[in-house]
Image: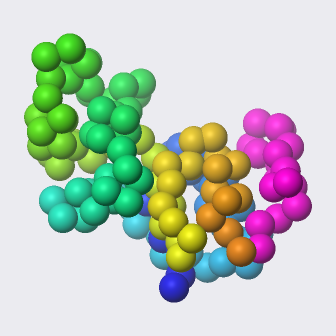
Amino acid sequence: MRPTIYHNPECGTSRNVLEILRESGEAPDIVLYLERGWQREQLAGLLDDLALKPSDVLRVSKSPAEELGLTGPDITEGELFEAMLQHPILVNRPIVVTKKGTALCRPSEKVFALLDNPPASFTKEDGETVTSG
């Protein structure tokens, strides 16, 4: 099974995770979810695999979440889910799926736990070096 990364190339964390995957020797399937959008079953399956609710993966910064009224206390998980289907940018990223599991890889070093051969260390775009051990 090849890893899959739900990726936004404009996101530094997502770019770091993609490079960590590549440095581990993996050739991941890259899903540009902002372009493709989410399918109902796909997003529901990822949330199940993550054991998270829509509110746990809601991206508030640099998204229309507040403008759409999705940050209030009365918003239901169902309403958030439907909004995420309409506005893919509302889902935080990157999400990575490997044979070892599924994770929202924020911070980027969370991806190490999903890899058979993670690099011993990785230097992020901001210059911070993280290690797999």
**Of 125 and 71, which appears nearest the observer?**
71
Residue located at (51% from left, 85% from top): 1
Which quadrant of the figure contains the C terminus? Answer: bottom right
Vertical relation: 17 (above or below) 59: below
In the image: residue 98, left or right of residue 48: right
**Of 129 and 114, which appears nearest the observer?**
114
Q: Main structural element of the magenta stretch: helix, strand or loop?
A: loop
Q: Is residue 7 visible?
A: no
Residue located at (81% from left, 55% from top): 132
Q: Position of residue 110 (x, y in %)?
A: 64, 50
Residue located at (41% from left, 24% from top): 61
Splitting the image into 4 quarters, where does residue 58 fall? top left
Q: Position of residue 39 (x, y in %)?
A: 19, 62
Q: Position of residue 121 (x, y in %)?
A: 87, 55
**Residue 21 is one of the magenta-drawn residues:** no
**Magenta-drawn segment:** 117-133
In the image as oriented, which residue stretches furthest toward the bottom?
Answer: 1
